[in-house]
Image (spheres, rainbow, N blue to C red):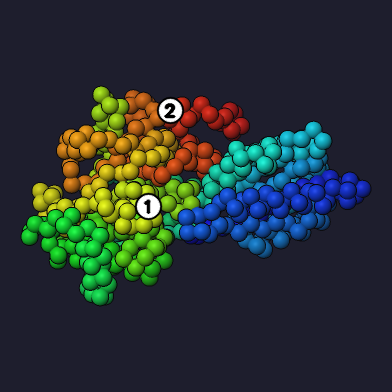
Amino acid sequence: MKSTPIGIALINDEREHVWRANREECMEVVHKWAEIIRRGVKNIDGTSPEVIVGSDTITSVKVAQKIGEELARANCKQIILCFYVWNFPYLVWPFINSIGRDKPILCLSNNSGKYPGNVGLLATDGALRQVGIRTHRIIGDMNDPEVQAKVIDWVRAAQAYTTIQNEVYGMYGGHSMGMETGYFHLVPIIKTFGVTVCQIDQLLLVEKMKEVDEHEVGKAMKWFTEMLGDRIKYDGKMLTPETLKRQIRLYLAMRMINEEMGFNFCGIKGQRELSEYVCITDVAEMLMNDPYDWNGPKEPMVCATEADSLAAVTMQLLKYISGGLPVLFMDVRLYHPDKDLWDFCNSGNHASWYASRSIDPKENFKKVTFHPALEFYFKAGGASVEFDAAPGPITFARLGLWDDKLYMVIVLGEAVELSPEERKAINEQTNPTWPHVHARLHCKFDEFIEVFPCNHILGVAGNHVRALKYLCEIAGIEPIILGPEAQKYAKPIWKHIT
Protein backbone atom coordinates (compact mmCIF):
# COMPACT_ATOMS: atom_id res chain seq x y z
CA MET A 1 0.00 0.00 0.00
CA LYS A 2 1.13 3.53 -0.70
CA SER A 3 2.81 5.49 2.07
CA THR A 4 5.00 8.53 2.54
CA PRO A 5 8.36 8.77 4.38
CA ILE A 6 8.41 9.88 8.01
CA GLY A 7 11.27 12.01 9.31
CA ILE A 8 12.31 11.82 12.95
CA ALA A 9 14.91 13.96 14.74
CA LEU A 10 15.84 15.10 18.23
CA ILE A 11 16.67 18.65 19.35
CA ASN A 12 19.43 18.71 21.94
CA ASP A 13 21.28 21.09 24.20
CA GLU A 14 23.56 23.65 22.51
CA ARG A 15 26.31 23.36 25.15
CA GLU A 16 29.02 21.06 23.85
CA HIS A 17 29.90 19.43 27.17
CA VAL A 18 26.19 18.58 27.62
CA TRP A 19 25.41 17.15 24.20
CA ARG A 20 28.64 15.17 24.11
CA ALA A 21 27.57 13.51 27.35
CA ASN A 22 24.03 12.65 26.23
CA ARG A 23 24.31 12.29 22.44
CA GLU A 24 24.59 8.50 22.37
CA GLU A 25 21.63 8.00 24.69
CA CYS A 26 19.54 10.52 22.76
CA MET A 27 20.25 8.81 19.42
CA GLU A 28 19.29 5.49 20.99
CA VAL A 29 15.91 6.98 21.96
CA VAL A 30 15.27 8.23 18.44
CA HIS A 31 16.13 4.87 16.89
CA LYS A 32 13.88 3.07 19.39
CA TRP A 33 10.96 5.30 18.44
CA ALA A 34 11.67 4.70 14.76
CA GLU A 35 11.54 0.95 15.35
CA ILE A 36 8.30 1.22 17.37
CA ILE A 37 6.73 3.05 14.43
CA ARG A 38 8.01 0.53 11.86
CA ARG A 39 6.59 -2.34 13.89
CA GLY A 40 3.37 -0.64 14.92
CA VAL A 41 2.31 0.93 11.63
CA LYS A 42 1.98 -2.32 9.68
CA ASN A 43 -0.49 -2.39 6.82
CA ILE A 44 -2.58 -5.45 6.03
CA ASP A 45 -0.28 -6.22 3.10
CA GLY A 46 2.70 -6.36 5.47
CA THR A 47 4.24 -3.07 4.37
CA SER A 48 5.04 -0.15 6.65
CA PRO A 49 6.06 3.44 5.92
CA GLU A 50 9.73 4.34 5.63
CA VAL A 51 11.11 6.05 8.74
CA ILE A 52 14.14 8.29 8.18
CA VAL A 53 16.20 9.10 11.29
CA GLY A 54 18.26 12.28 11.38
CA SER A 55 21.97 11.44 11.38
CA ASP A 56 22.68 13.44 14.53
CA THR A 57 20.99 15.27 17.37
CA ILE A 58 20.40 18.95 16.66
CA THR A 59 22.91 21.00 18.65
CA SER A 60 23.49 24.11 16.54
CA VAL A 61 22.10 26.16 13.69
CA LYS A 62 24.33 24.40 11.15
CA VAL A 63 23.39 20.94 12.40
CA ALA A 64 19.70 21.90 12.42
CA GLN A 65 19.95 22.99 8.78
CA LYS A 66 21.89 19.85 7.87
CA ILE A 67 19.35 17.46 9.45
CA GLY A 68 16.43 19.38 7.94
CA GLU A 69 18.02 19.16 4.49
CA GLU A 70 18.67 15.42 4.97
CA LEU A 71 15.02 14.76 5.70
CA ALA A 72 13.91 17.05 2.88
CA ARG A 73 16.10 15.11 0.40
CA ALA A 74 14.51 11.90 1.69
CA ASN A 75 11.12 13.42 0.76
CA CYS A 76 9.78 13.16 4.32
CA LYS A 77 6.15 14.30 4.36
CA GLN A 78 5.63 14.34 8.14
CA ILE A 79 7.97 15.14 11.00
CA ILE A 80 8.33 13.74 14.49
CA LEU A 81 10.37 15.95 16.81
CA CYS A 82 11.74 14.00 19.76
CA PHE A 83 12.50 15.62 23.11
CA TYR A 84 14.48 13.70 25.71
CA VAL A 85 16.63 16.33 27.40
CA TRP A 86 16.49 20.09 27.72
CA ASN A 87 17.08 21.73 24.36
CA PHE A 88 17.56 25.23 22.95
CA PRO A 89 14.13 26.02 21.43
CA TYR A 90 15.24 28.46 18.73
CA LEU A 91 17.02 25.61 16.95
CA VAL A 92 13.65 24.33 15.78
CA TRP A 93 13.46 27.11 13.17
CA PRO A 94 16.53 26.35 11.04
CA PHE A 95 15.42 22.70 11.15
CA ILE A 96 11.76 23.29 10.25
CA ASN A 97 12.54 25.93 7.67
CA SER A 98 14.98 23.56 5.96
CA ILE A 99 12.45 20.77 5.63
CA GLY A 100 9.37 22.95 5.13
CA ARG A 101 6.68 24.29 7.46
CA ASP A 102 3.81 22.60 5.58
CA LYS A 103 4.34 19.18 7.17
CA PRO A 104 2.29 17.55 9.93
CA ILE A 105 4.41 17.82 13.08
CA LEU A 106 4.30 15.63 16.18
CA CYS A 107 6.25 16.70 19.25
CA LEU A 108 7.10 13.61 21.30
CA SER A 109 8.70 13.53 24.74
CA ASN A 110 9.48 11.45 27.79
CA ASN A 111 8.07 12.34 31.22
CA SER A 112 11.18 12.16 33.33
CA GLY A 113 12.43 14.06 36.35
CA LYS A 114 16.05 13.38 35.45
CA TYR A 115 15.81 14.53 31.83
CA PRO A 116 13.32 17.38 31.30
CA GLY A 117 12.30 16.50 27.75
CA ASN A 118 8.75 17.64 28.38
CA VAL A 119 10.07 21.06 29.41
CA GLY A 120 11.96 21.29 26.14
CA LEU A 121 8.87 20.16 24.24
CA LEU A 122 6.62 22.80 25.75
CA ALA A 123 9.19 25.55 25.20
CA THR A 124 9.90 24.56 21.61
CA ASP A 125 6.42 23.60 20.51
CA GLY A 126 5.16 26.76 22.14
CA ALA A 127 7.37 28.69 19.73
CA LEU A 128 5.84 26.83 16.76
CA ARG A 129 2.29 27.43 17.94
CA GLN A 130 2.95 31.13 18.57
CA VAL A 131 3.17 31.65 14.82
CA GLY A 132 0.12 29.52 14.06
CA ILE A 133 1.73 26.20 13.18
CA ARG A 134 -0.61 23.38 14.17
CA THR A 135 1.19 20.61 16.01
CA HIS A 136 0.32 17.64 18.19
CA ARG A 137 1.95 16.71 21.48
CA ILE A 138 2.42 13.29 23.10
CA ILE A 139 4.29 12.97 26.39
CA GLY A 140 4.99 9.72 28.22
CA ASP A 141 7.09 6.59 28.61
CA MET A 142 8.02 5.07 25.27
CA ASN A 143 7.45 1.59 26.73
CA ASP A 144 3.85 2.42 27.69
CA PRO A 145 1.47 0.69 25.22
CA GLU A 146 -1.02 3.57 25.41
CA VAL A 147 1.68 6.12 24.54
CA GLN A 148 2.77 3.92 21.63
CA ALA A 149 -0.87 3.61 20.49
CA LYS A 150 -1.23 7.40 20.44
CA VAL A 151 1.92 7.75 18.34
CA ILE A 152 0.76 5.05 15.92
CA ASP A 153 -2.65 6.73 15.58
CA TRP A 154 -0.95 10.05 14.83
CA VAL A 155 1.27 8.42 12.22
CA ARG A 156 -1.78 6.78 10.60
CA ALA A 157 -3.49 10.17 10.48
CA ALA A 158 -0.46 11.93 9.02
CA GLN A 159 -0.02 9.13 6.48
CA ALA A 160 -3.64 9.43 5.35
CA TYR A 161 -3.30 13.19 4.96
CA THR A 162 0.03 13.21 3.14
CA THR A 163 -0.71 10.20 0.93
CA ILE A 164 -4.05 11.39 -0.44
CA GLN A 165 -2.62 14.83 -1.31
CA ASN A 166 -1.10 13.70 -4.60
CA GLU A 167 -3.93 11.41 -5.67
CA VAL A 168 -6.62 11.60 -8.34
CA TYR A 169 -10.20 10.42 -7.91
CA GLY A 170 -11.77 8.84 -10.98
CA MET A 171 -15.46 9.71 -11.17
CA TYR A 172 -17.39 7.62 -13.67
CA GLY A 173 -20.51 9.44 -14.80
CA GLY A 174 -20.91 12.17 -12.18
CA HIS A 175 -23.08 12.28 -9.08
CA SER A 176 -26.14 10.06 -9.31
CA MET A 177 -29.81 11.07 -9.39
CA GLY A 178 -29.04 14.67 -8.47
CA MET A 179 -27.59 13.88 -5.01
CA GLU A 180 -25.77 17.14 -4.44
CA THR A 181 -24.13 15.92 -1.22
CA GLY A 182 -22.25 13.47 -3.46
CA TYR A 183 -20.88 16.13 -5.81
CA PHE A 184 -17.11 16.70 -5.99
CA HIS A 185 -16.93 20.20 -4.48
CA LEU A 186 -13.64 21.11 -6.11
CA VAL A 187 -12.32 24.09 -4.17
CA PRO A 188 -12.77 22.95 -0.55
CA ILE A 189 -11.58 19.42 -1.33
CA ILE A 190 -8.44 20.54 -3.15
CA LYS A 191 -7.69 23.23 -0.56
CA THR A 192 -8.05 20.74 2.29
CA PHE A 193 -6.67 17.48 0.92
CA GLY A 194 -4.97 18.32 -2.39
CA VAL A 195 -6.79 15.49 -4.16
CA THR A 196 -8.48 16.32 -7.45
CA VAL A 197 -10.98 14.61 -9.74
CA CYS A 198 -11.09 13.40 -13.32
CA GLN A 199 -14.63 12.84 -14.58
CA ILE A 200 -15.06 10.06 -17.15
CA ASP A 201 -18.27 9.39 -19.04
CA GLN A 202 -19.74 5.94 -18.36
CA LEU A 203 -19.71 5.38 -22.12
CA LEU A 204 -15.97 4.76 -21.87
CA LEU A 205 -16.65 1.92 -19.43
CA VAL A 206 -19.19 0.39 -21.80
CA GLU A 207 -16.74 0.57 -24.71
CA LYS A 208 -13.87 -0.77 -22.60
CA MET A 209 -16.05 -3.74 -21.61
CA LYS A 210 -15.80 -4.87 -25.24
CA GLU A 211 -12.01 -5.14 -24.89
CA VAL A 212 -12.08 -7.34 -21.80
CA ASP A 213 -10.28 -10.68 -22.02
CA GLU A 214 -13.02 -13.32 -22.12
CA HIS A 215 -10.64 -15.83 -20.56
CA GLU A 216 -10.64 -13.62 -17.43
CA VAL A 217 -14.44 -13.52 -17.49
CA GLY A 218 -14.49 -17.33 -17.64
CA LYS A 219 -12.10 -17.57 -14.68
CA ALA A 220 -14.32 -15.23 -12.69
CA MET A 221 -17.47 -17.21 -13.50
CA LYS A 222 -15.77 -20.43 -12.44
CA TRP A 223 -14.60 -18.78 -9.20
CA PHE A 224 -18.06 -17.47 -8.33
CA THR A 225 -19.68 -20.79 -9.20
CA GLU A 226 -17.26 -22.67 -6.94
CA MET A 227 -17.66 -20.13 -4.13
CA LEU A 228 -21.44 -19.75 -4.23
CA GLY A 229 -22.92 -22.77 -5.99
CA ASP A 230 -26.71 -22.63 -5.87
CA ARG A 231 -26.50 -19.35 -3.95
CA ILE A 232 -26.29 -17.69 -7.36
CA LYS A 233 -30.06 -17.39 -7.73
CA TYR A 234 -30.40 -17.43 -11.52
CA ASP A 235 -33.96 -16.59 -12.52
CA GLY A 236 -33.63 -16.69 -16.31
CA LYS A 237 -34.42 -12.99 -16.64
CA MET A 238 -32.75 -10.48 -14.32
CA LEU A 239 -29.91 -12.74 -13.20
CA THR A 240 -28.52 -14.98 -15.89
CA PRO A 241 -24.99 -16.14 -16.68
CA GLU A 242 -24.82 -13.36 -19.27
CA THR A 243 -25.91 -10.53 -16.94
CA LEU A 244 -23.40 -11.75 -14.34
CA LYS A 245 -20.70 -11.80 -17.03
CA ARG A 246 -21.57 -8.19 -17.85
CA GLN A 247 -20.96 -7.23 -14.23
CA ILE A 248 -17.60 -9.00 -14.33
CA ARG A 249 -16.68 -7.18 -17.55
CA LEU A 250 -17.63 -3.90 -15.89
CA TYR A 251 -15.26 -4.65 -13.00
CA LEU A 252 -12.42 -5.53 -15.37
CA ALA A 253 -13.06 -2.48 -17.56
CA MET A 254 -13.01 -0.19 -14.52
CA ARG A 255 -9.74 -1.74 -13.35
CA MET A 256 -8.22 -1.23 -16.82
CA ILE A 257 -9.22 2.43 -17.01
CA ASN A 258 -8.13 3.10 -13.42
CA GLU A 259 -4.72 1.69 -14.28
CA GLU A 260 -4.43 3.53 -17.61
CA MET A 261 -5.52 6.87 -16.10
CA GLY A 262 -3.60 6.48 -12.85
CA PHE A 263 -6.68 6.81 -10.64
CA ASN A 264 -6.04 6.03 -6.98
CA PHE A 265 -9.70 5.55 -6.06
CA CYS A 266 -12.97 5.90 -7.89
CA GLY A 267 -16.75 6.21 -7.86
CA ILE A 268 -19.32 4.97 -10.33
CA LYS A 269 -22.67 6.60 -11.03
CA GLY A 270 -24.57 3.48 -12.08
CA GLN A 271 -28.08 4.88 -11.93
CA ARG A 272 -29.66 5.38 -14.24
CA GLU A 273 -27.66 4.77 -17.42
CA LEU A 274 -25.86 1.55 -16.45
CA SER A 275 -28.66 0.18 -14.29
CA GLU A 276 -31.22 0.58 -17.08
CA TYR A 277 -29.16 -0.26 -20.17
CA VAL A 278 -26.06 -2.30 -19.19
CA CYS A 279 -26.11 -3.91 -15.71
CA ILE A 280 -26.18 -2.93 -12.08
CA THR A 281 -22.81 -2.12 -10.55
CA ASP A 282 -23.08 -4.14 -7.32
CA VAL A 283 -20.69 -7.00 -8.17
CA ALA A 284 -18.11 -4.66 -9.69
CA GLU A 285 -18.20 -2.39 -6.62
CA MET A 286 -17.88 -5.35 -4.25
CA LEU A 287 -14.86 -6.69 -6.14
CA MET A 288 -13.18 -3.28 -6.29
CA ASN A 289 -13.45 -2.81 -2.52
CA ASP A 290 -12.49 -6.39 -1.61
CA PRO A 291 -8.88 -7.43 -0.80
CA TYR A 292 -9.05 -10.32 -3.30
CA ASP A 293 -10.62 -11.59 -6.51
CA TRP A 294 -10.26 -14.81 -8.53
CA ASN A 295 -6.57 -14.04 -9.15
CA GLY A 296 -5.78 -13.95 -5.43
CA PRO A 297 -5.00 -11.21 -2.89
CA LYS A 298 -4.98 -7.57 -4.04
CA GLU A 299 -5.11 -4.13 -2.51
CA PRO A 300 -8.69 -2.88 -2.02
CA MET A 301 -9.51 -0.17 -4.55
CA VAL A 302 -11.98 2.26 -3.02
CA CYS A 303 -15.05 2.54 -5.24
CA ALA A 304 -18.04 4.60 -4.12
CA THR A 305 -21.46 3.77 -5.45
CA GLU A 306 -23.56 6.47 -7.09
CA ALA A 307 -20.27 8.33 -7.60
CA ASP A 308 -20.66 9.94 -4.19
CA SER A 309 -17.44 11.91 -4.17
CA LEU A 310 -17.29 13.01 -0.54
CA ALA A 311 -18.04 9.39 0.35
CA ALA A 312 -15.15 8.28 -1.85
CA VAL A 313 -12.72 10.74 -0.23
CA THR A 314 -13.90 9.61 3.22
CA MET A 315 -13.45 5.96 2.20
CA GLN A 316 -9.92 6.58 0.95
CA LEU A 317 -9.01 8.28 4.21
CA LEU A 318 -10.51 5.39 6.20
CA LYS A 319 -8.55 2.91 4.11
CA TYR A 320 -5.28 4.66 4.96
CA ILE A 321 -6.24 5.21 8.61
CA SER A 322 -6.90 1.47 9.01
CA GLY A 323 -3.76 0.28 7.24
CA GLY A 324 -5.52 -0.86 4.07
CA LEU A 325 -8.71 -2.53 5.25
CA PRO A 326 -11.77 -2.64 2.98
CA VAL A 327 -14.22 0.19 3.66
CA LEU A 328 -18.02 -0.01 3.81
CA PHE A 329 -20.41 2.29 1.96
CA MET A 330 -23.98 2.22 3.30
CA ASP A 331 -27.30 3.99 3.18
CA VAL A 332 -28.55 5.33 6.50
CA ARG A 333 -31.69 3.30 5.93
CA LEU A 334 -33.83 2.41 8.95
CA TYR A 335 -33.67 2.92 12.73
CA HIS A 336 -35.37 0.47 15.10
CA PRO A 337 -35.99 2.43 18.32
CA ASP A 338 -37.15 -0.65 20.25
CA LYS A 339 -33.72 -2.21 19.69
CA ASP A 340 -31.62 0.98 19.42
CA LEU A 341 -30.40 -0.54 16.18
CA TRP A 342 -29.68 0.86 12.74
CA ASP A 343 -30.10 -1.16 9.56
CA PHE A 344 -27.49 0.24 7.17
CA CYS A 345 -28.04 -1.23 3.71
CA ASN A 346 -27.98 -0.34 0.06
CA SER A 347 -27.75 -2.05 -3.30
CA GLY A 348 -24.12 -3.05 -3.67
CA ASN A 349 -20.80 -1.65 -2.49
CA HIS A 350 -20.38 -3.80 0.66
CA ALA A 351 -17.03 -5.58 0.36
CA SER A 352 -17.65 -9.31 0.91
CA TRP A 353 -14.75 -9.20 3.43
CA TYR A 354 -17.26 -7.95 6.01
CA ALA A 355 -19.30 -11.16 5.84
CA SER A 356 -16.74 -12.92 8.07
CA ARG A 357 -13.86 -10.37 8.22
CA SER A 358 -11.56 -13.03 6.77
CA ILE A 359 -8.70 -12.61 4.32
CA ASP A 360 -9.80 -16.00 2.92
CA PRO A 361 -12.61 -15.34 0.40
CA LYS A 362 -14.03 -18.83 0.97
CA GLU A 363 -14.89 -17.92 4.56
CA ASN A 364 -16.68 -14.76 3.48
CA PHE A 365 -18.51 -16.18 0.47
CA LYS A 366 -20.01 -18.94 2.64
CA LYS A 367 -22.37 -16.22 3.84
CA VAL A 368 -22.95 -14.44 0.50
CA THR A 369 -25.83 -14.91 -1.93
CA PHE A 370 -26.31 -13.40 -5.39
CA HIS A 371 -29.95 -12.46 -5.97
CA PRO A 372 -31.63 -11.19 -9.15
CA ALA A 373 -31.64 -7.39 -9.30
CA LEU A 374 -34.96 -5.71 -8.62
CA GLU A 375 -36.56 -5.11 -12.01
CA PHE A 376 -38.58 -2.19 -10.64
CA TYR A 377 -35.40 -0.13 -10.16
CA PHE A 378 -32.70 -1.88 -12.19
CA LYS A 379 -34.06 -2.89 -15.60
CA ALA A 380 -30.73 -4.05 -17.04
CA GLY A 381 -30.39 -6.79 -14.43
CA GLY A 382 -27.45 -8.51 -12.85
CA ALA A 383 -26.74 -9.82 -9.37
CA SER A 384 -27.47 -8.05 -6.10
CA VAL A 385 -25.00 -9.09 -3.42
CA GLU A 386 -26.58 -10.13 -0.10
CA PHE A 387 -25.05 -10.90 3.29
CA ASP A 388 -25.16 -9.64 6.87
CA ALA A 389 -21.98 -8.09 8.21
CA ALA A 390 -20.14 -10.11 10.83
CA PRO A 391 -20.14 -8.70 14.37
CA GLY A 392 -17.33 -6.44 15.48
CA PRO A 393 -16.34 -2.82 16.13
CA ILE A 394 -16.68 -0.32 13.28
CA THR A 395 -15.69 3.34 13.10
CA PHE A 396 -18.29 5.23 11.08
CA ALA A 397 -17.50 8.57 9.46
CA ARG A 398 -18.53 10.99 6.76
CA LEU A 399 -17.18 14.24 5.36
CA GLY A 400 -19.74 16.97 4.99
CA LEU A 401 -19.91 20.62 4.02
CA TRP A 402 -21.31 23.59 5.93
CA ASP A 403 -21.31 26.77 3.86
CA ASP A 404 -18.50 25.33 1.70
CA LYS A 405 -16.35 24.34 4.73
CA LEU A 406 -15.50 20.69 5.25
CA TYR A 407 -16.13 18.85 8.50
CA MET A 408 -16.20 15.18 9.47
CA VAL A 409 -18.75 13.37 11.61
CA ILE A 410 -17.18 10.46 13.50
CA VAL A 411 -18.98 7.87 15.62
CA LEU A 412 -17.83 4.59 17.08
CA GLY A 413 -20.18 1.64 16.79
CA GLU A 414 -20.40 -2.03 16.07
CA ALA A 415 -22.04 -4.54 13.83
CA VAL A 416 -24.07 -6.78 16.12
CA GLU A 417 -24.93 -10.46 15.98
CA LEU A 418 -28.65 -11.20 15.74
CA SER A 419 -30.53 -14.46 15.62
CA PRO A 420 -31.41 -15.73 12.12
CA GLU A 421 -35.08 -15.01 12.78
CA GLU A 422 -34.41 -11.46 13.93
CA ARG A 423 -32.09 -10.74 11.01
CA LYS A 424 -34.66 -12.00 8.53
CA ALA A 425 -37.45 -9.93 10.06
CA ILE A 426 -35.34 -6.76 10.04
CA ASN A 427 -34.00 -7.26 6.50
CA GLU A 428 -37.46 -7.84 5.06
CA GLN A 429 -38.52 -4.38 6.22
CA THR A 430 -36.11 -2.86 3.68
CA ASN A 431 -34.72 -5.28 1.09
CA PRO A 432 -33.65 -8.84 1.89
CA THR A 433 -31.62 -9.15 -1.33
CA TRP A 434 -29.13 -6.43 -0.36
CA PRO A 435 -26.20 -6.44 2.08
CA HIS A 436 -26.94 -5.26 5.63
CA VAL A 437 -24.99 -3.95 8.59
CA HIS A 438 -27.03 -4.22 11.79
CA ALA A 439 -25.31 -1.40 13.60
CA ARG A 440 -25.43 -0.08 17.12
CA LEU A 441 -23.95 3.41 17.30
CA HIS A 442 -22.37 4.71 20.49
CA CYS A 443 -24.54 7.81 20.40
CA LYS A 444 -28.17 8.75 20.69
CA PHE A 445 -30.50 8.80 17.68
CA ASP A 446 -31.22 12.53 18.02
CA GLU A 447 -27.54 13.40 18.29
CA PHE A 448 -26.79 11.49 15.10
CA ILE A 449 -29.73 12.83 13.10
CA GLU A 450 -29.02 16.43 14.12
CA VAL A 451 -25.49 16.57 12.66
CA PHE A 452 -25.11 13.82 10.04
CA PRO A 453 -24.56 15.46 6.64
CA CYS A 454 -26.30 13.14 4.16
CA ASN A 455 -27.82 9.73 3.36
CA HIS A 456 -24.57 7.78 2.88
CA ILE A 457 -22.38 6.62 5.77
CA LEU A 458 -18.94 5.01 5.57
CA GLY A 459 -17.27 2.63 7.96
CA VAL A 460 -14.13 0.59 8.59
CA ALA A 461 -13.46 -2.24 11.03
CA GLY A 462 -11.89 -1.30 14.37
CA ASN A 463 -11.70 1.77 16.58
CA HIS A 464 -10.01 4.62 14.71
CA VAL A 465 -11.68 7.61 16.40
CA ARG A 466 -8.46 9.10 17.81
CA ALA A 467 -6.65 8.73 14.49
CA LEU A 468 -9.51 10.47 12.67
CA LYS A 469 -9.46 13.30 15.20
CA TYR A 470 -5.73 13.74 14.56
CA LEU A 471 -6.40 13.65 10.81
CA CYS A 472 -9.05 16.36 10.97
CA GLU A 473 -6.84 18.61 13.07
CA ILE A 474 -3.90 18.12 10.69
CA ALA A 475 -6.15 18.93 7.72
CA GLY A 476 -7.72 21.94 9.43
CA ILE A 477 -11.31 20.65 9.43
CA GLU A 478 -13.76 20.23 12.30
CA PRO A 479 -14.05 16.71 13.77
CA ILE A 480 -17.55 16.19 15.17
CA ILE A 481 -17.21 13.15 17.45
CA LEU A 482 -20.50 11.76 18.68
CA GLY A 483 -21.35 9.97 21.90
CA PRO A 484 -19.15 9.39 24.95
CA GLU A 485 -16.01 9.12 22.81
CA ALA A 486 -16.13 12.91 22.42
CA GLN A 487 -15.42 13.34 26.15
CA LYS A 488 -12.10 11.51 25.90
CA TYR A 489 -10.36 14.21 23.88
CA ALA A 490 -9.31 17.75 24.72
CA LYS A 491 -9.80 20.62 22.31
CA PRO A 492 -6.60 21.89 20.64
CA ILE A 493 -5.45 25.42 21.38
CA TRP A 494 -6.71 26.83 18.08
CA LYS A 495 -10.29 25.82 19.00
CA HIS A 496 -10.08 27.75 22.26
CA ILE A 497 -9.07 31.06 20.71
CA THR A 498 -10.78 31.11 17.29
SS at mark 1?
loop
Label 2 or label 1, whichever lies nearer to me, is: 1
How many other residues sit within 10 Å of disc 2, few (<14), some (14-19) or many (≥20)?
some
Q: Quadrant of residue 493?
A: top right
> From the viewer's perspective, is residue 144 above or below residue 212?
above
Q: Quadrant of the C terminus?
A: top right
Quick check: 423 left or right of 462?
left
Asked if residue 189 lies left or right of residue 254, the reply is right
Marker disc for residue 358: 1
Residue shown at 37% from the left, 36% from the top: 414
Q: Secondary structure at mark 2?
A: helix
> Measured from the top left, where is residue 45 in percent x and y?
47, 59
Under mark 1, the amino acid is Ser
**Figure disc tally:** 2
> Which residue appears at 33% of the width and 43% of the height?
390
Q: Is residue 37 above or below residue 255?
A: above
User: What's the residue at 61%, 40% (across, down)?
Assistant: 145
The single residue placed furthest to the right in the displayed view is 17
220 vs 43: above or below: below
Measuring 31% from the left and 57% from the top, which residue is drawn there? 362
Which amino acid, by three-letter code, is at mark 2?
Gly
Residue 56 visible (yes or no)? yes
Residue at image mark 2: 483
Drawn side of residue 354 relative to residue 491, left or right: left
Residue 168: which disc? none
Residue 393 at what x, y percent from top left?
41, 39
| Residue 98 appears in view | no
The quadrant in which residue 74 appears is bottom right
Instruction: Give percent across and percent down for residue 320.
Output: 47, 51
**Residue situated in front as seen by the camera: 165 or 489:** 489
Q: Nearer the viewer, residue 253 or 192?
A: 253
